[in-house]
Image (cartoon, grey):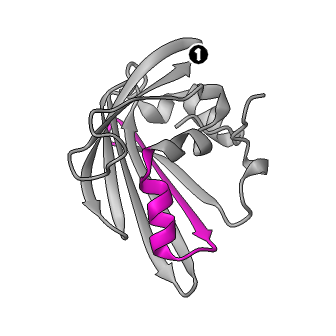
Amino acid sequence: MSTSCKSSNLPIDFRINIRAFEKGYRLDTFLTLPIPCEKAFVFFENPKNLFDITPGWLDFRMVTNKDGESVFEGAEYDYYIRWFGFKLKWRSRIQAYNPPYDFTDIQIVGPYSKWEHTHIFKEQGKNTLMLDTVVYKIPFLSEHPERNTFISNSYKSGTVFA
């Protein structure tokens, strides 16, 4: 069974904003989590949890890494995803790591021309506000992102491909 990213499946307080940005895209999401900041950070920093939060239709698979499960600045992780039926290799690197407040991962091998994903966790009483920013460029589609009807129609319909 495939996991959907339709907006009807998202939490009611989830907010998303996407816009053309420097010949690519910038995706910002905001979500309040009913857990302390430290607990949220520990979950989202662990690359093994990506399987649970990645849409099923991407057929996400993690490859054993030389760094194991350790997370630190400079750590690299290898994955495979399936995109339009093609199996694609993805390698990410932790570029910045500041527990329990934020970390940034970048794609160093994969389907995007650029992928930079910053995760920010802000304590709000007993809750945590999680802010995610992804700046990315899609090969062959990023020259004029404001004209790309495939991407803009996908987001208008509530289907998220990033």
Q: Residue at x 37, y 45 (%)?
A: 69
**Residue 149 picture location, percent across and down:** 58, 28
- Above/below status of 72 relative to 122: above
Question: What residue did someone put label 1 on?
Answer: 84
**Residue 15 picture location, percent across and down:** 61, 60
| Image quarter of residue 139 | top left
Q: Nearer the viewer, residue 137 or 104?
A: 104
Number of labelled discs?
A: 1
Query: In the drawing, does residue 59 fall left or right of residue 134?
Result: right
- Above/below status of 143 relative to 41: above
Q: Residue at x 55, y 20 (%)?
A: 82
**Residue 148 picture location, percent across and down:** 51, 28
Quadrant including the N terminus:
top right
Query: In the drawing, does residue 15 fall left or right of residue 95?
Result: right
Q: Residue at x 54, y 54 (%)?
A: 17
Decide whether residue 75 is among the magenta residues: no
Outermost residue, left side: 74
Q: Residue at x 44, y 51 (%)?
A: 46
| Image quarter of residue 101 | bottom left
| Image quarter of residue 79 | top left
Decide whether residue 25 is among the magenta residues: yes
- Secondary element at image label 1: loop
Q: Which portion, as a residue range, is magenta?
A: 22-47
Amino acid at pointer 1: Phe
Q: Nearer the viewer, residue 34 or 155?
A: 34
Q: Nearer the viewer, residue 32 or 24?
A: 32
* Label 1 crowd (10 A; few <14 / some 14-19 / many >=20): few
**Residue 68 picture location, percent across and down:** 33, 40
